[in-house]
Image (cartoon, rainbow, N blue to C red):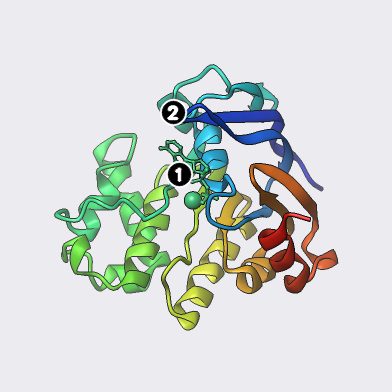
Amino acid sequence: MTALLLEIDGLSVDRGGARVVTDLDARLEQGEVLSIMGANGAGKSSLLRAVIGLEAAAEGRVLLDEVDLTALKPRDRAARGIGFCPEGRRLFPGLTVEENLAVVFEGPSRARRFRVEEMFARFPALAAKRRDRAWSLSGGQQQMLAIARAIMNAPRLVLLDEPTLGLAPMIIDEVLEIVRAIAVEGTGVLMAEQNVTPALRVADRVLVLARGRVVEGGSADDLSAERIATLMLTGA
Ligand SMILES: Nc1ncnc2c1ncn2[C@@H]1O[C@H](COP(=O)(O)OP(=O)(O)O)[C@@H](O)[C@H]1O
Ligand SMILES: [Mg+2]
């Protein structure tokens, strides 16, 4: 059984006076990973930011569970069940691992402590570092922490902006295993990526963006890494 979670209808986004996402349609079901692939500047981050509400929609709509979120502020979208892991992680470097998680939690302190422990059970590498400051972690650990923080409030949909950027291949696989596990539990994952081969492996479906437009889309099984890489470069 599948259930539609996220629906993006005819979304266009303007930044700095230019249209950076044009008339984009996308659907994401519960428990699915949708990988948005595109070169630098293709509009991946702008798309994710428009879904969480950090960029306005110039045209079109964003719906979660058939509810139109387009007019809502980022905070209200998050409250409806969207988690966001921004490009470059944006951790609180001077806070400890534990504090990075606790500080975003919405709810009473006992529930917060319980949820932090749940996160440590799921991310043992972070548990070992719980009292270390975020800046002192390795790149892979920082990315795990950023993902853990994005799912602290048990969102129905999580947006991950280039979670494998700058990581070694072995660490990329570890991060994407976590992404897969999050989806298996029923959370929808909308992920922007440029690392085509690993992102294709973890994805159920793929959209390829070039200059803000969808140039290819479909089931991950029907697309090859070579074709996606070519489309990312040429847009045709
Ligand atoms: N803060 C900004 N102000 C104006 N233009 C921006 C800003 N951020 C990105 N852009 C432009 O928006 C387009 C899409 O960028 P972005 O969404 O960041 O792409 P990607 O994440 O795929 O690299 C690019 O042309 C980029 O130059
Ligand atoms: Mg980006």
Task: Answer whether residue 123 is visible to the viewer in this image.
Answer: yes
Disc 1 secondary structure class: strand
For the point 62% across and 56% down, the residue is: 38
| Residue depicted at 53% across the width and 76% down the height | 173
Q: Is 226 placed above or below 213 here?
A: below
Give me the residue at 32% from left, 64% from top. Answer: 142
Q: Is residue 227 left or right of residue 5?
A: right
**From the viewer's perspective, is residue 92 above or below residue 26?**
below
Neighbour class for label 1 at 10 Å: few (<14), some, many (≥20)? many
The CA span between labels 2 and 1 is 10 Å
Would you call the spot at circle 2 few (<14 residues within 10 Å), some (14-19), or many (20 or more)?
A: many
* Element on which disc 2 rests: helix
Residue of label 2? 74
| Residue 96 image offset from top left, x and y in percent | 18, 58
Q: Earlier in the sequence, mark 2 or mark 1?
A: 2
Locate residue 184, reporting x and y percent: 64, 59
